[in-house]
Image: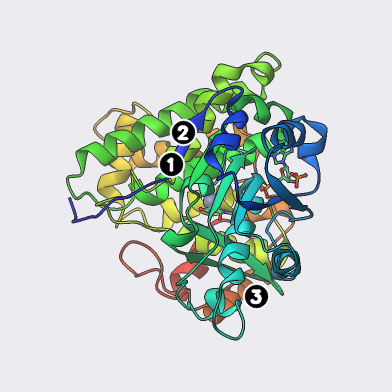
Amino acid sequence: MLNFSLYNPTRIHFGQGQIAQISREIPADAKVLVTYGGGSIKSNGVYGQVSEALKNHQWVEFSGIEPNPGYDTLMRAQQLIKAHDIDYLLAVGGGSVVDGTKFIAAAALYEGDDPWDILAKGQEVTRALPLAAVLTLPATGSESNGNSVVTRDGSKLAFSSALVRPLFAVLDPQVSLSLSDRQISNGVVDAFVHITEQYLTYPVDAKVQDRFAEGLLLTLIEEGPKALTAEGKTDLKVRGNIMWSATQALNGLIGAGVPQDWATHMIGHELTGAYGIDHARTLSIVLPAVMKVCRQSKREKLLQYATRVWQLTGENEEQIIDEAIRLTEQFFVDMAVPVRLAEVNLGLAEVEHLLAKLEQHGMSALGENGDITLAVSREILSAAL
Ligand code: NZQ
Ligand code: ZN
């Protein structure tokens, strides 16, 4: 396996009733800004639990962080931070709220001219306000990683810094019971693809990471469809397993010491930036095409994936890979997400626009080998038509 240094200091409070932990976790003298999205936390009781836990703290709130959080929205929080001398951020929501809050934390103490440079020019984050998260949508892993994705004018860009990794995260599966089927599907599929981005590359004899990744994939394949059934909708065991899988999928553990791909995500971000398609639904369209186009460079891991995750056996390796790709697509279909661009009303005409966007964002050497050029991305998008 490759060399690595691993440090994940996010304390996890998992289980029902754990929102109460925030009263102990956040320093008593902190001036807290509670951030959230469009209001789901008001109707599912999470806002009430957070208010109760913070009853002895000084806090104000900032709402309206939208899915695929926008730069302009996030910059509006800065006035509130200055006016109330805020020194601690608590994100309550899904990946968009957590990501958005990370950017707010970094922008608040940014010393350059324009905090957008953190994303557009890769300016290093040298200071950030401390933050924590109450997660309401298992999907991104943002609750215990240092990544954040922010959108401005159709460009969806990412930054990463250990300084914006949440200090603690509350994972209460109960709060995910109010999710719509669409968001459950999105979450399971996003987590699934986070795992494949760190697993379906080339072997480096990283047996622990591989087995962890396979265990998480198997769990999502087993539990994901259950969460969409009538009985599964209220099953906290199912929700708990999905929630913990999604965190583990992108908290640094399975990606340590192994090559990583991320081509599916980078191409997917252009689909969201240009056409507003939900993040996970871009991934379910792009991943099968990446598997098809990159089947030679990913050959050994595709075979391992086929054998260990889908229990496929037989003499004909090409057939086994074909079947593993087919079963992956079928899993996405079972999770009610699209697997072709046509399903989201996009076609050949949009492919050129997406390629121009990839070029504009410097995405011309993607994948674990850096060999997914724009020409290869064209092949991938064509395979996804
Ligand atoms: O805004 P509210 O009213 O809260 O509604 C949200 C939103 O409309 C709703 N929701 C969340 N929790 C709910 C709920 N509705 C009912 N009950 C609940 N318990 O769900 C909708 C979608 O929320 P969002 O936060 O956008 O979803 P998700 O968690 O999938 O986050 C997606 C964002 O994360 C980024 C994506 O690019 C996208 O911007 N990602 C972040 C990553 C990271 N930080 O590591 C990695 C990922 O690959 C991804 O790129
Ligand atoms: Zn993702």
Do tag 2 and tag 3 residues touch (Cβ < 8 Å)?
A: no
The amino acid type found where label 3 is placed reads His
Front residue of 263/138: it is: 138
Q: Label 2: how many residues lie within 10 Å, few (<14), some (14-19) or many (20+)?
A: many
Residue 161 visible in this rendered orientation of the protein? yes
Mark 1 secondary-structure assignment: helix
Toward the top, the furthest residue is 231
Do tag 3 and tag 1 residues touch (Cβ < 8 Å)?
A: no
Mark 3 secondary-structure assignment: helix
Relative height, residue 147 to residue 12 (above, below): below
Estimate the spatial distance between the alpha carbons at disc 2 and disc 3, rounded to whole Å. 35 Å
Q: Residue at x 58, y 51 (%)?
A: 285
Toward the bottom, the furthest residue is 113
340 relative to 78 in the view: left or right: left
Q: Ligand 2: does it lie within 8 Å of the C-beta at label 1?
A: no
Front residue of 185/54: it is: 54
Q: Earlier in the sequence, mark 2 or mark 3?
A: 2
The residue to which callout 2 is attached is 245
**Circle 2 or circle 3, nearest the eye:** 2
Do tag 2 and tag 1 residues touch (Cβ < 8 Å)?
A: yes
Mark number displayed over residue 320:
none
Q: Residue 193 appears at what percent x and percent y?
A: 48, 46
Estimate the spatial distance between the alpha carbons at disc 3 and disc 1, rounded to whole Å. 31 Å
Q: Residue 53 appears at what percent x and percent y?
A: 67, 33
Mark number displayed over residue 249:
1
Q: Label 3: how many residues lie within 10 Å, few (<14), some (14-19) or many (20+)?
A: some
Q: Residue 294 appears at what percent x and percent y?
A: 37, 57
Front residue of 252/371: it is: 252
Mark 2 secondary-structure assignment: helix
Quarter assignment of residue 364: bottom left
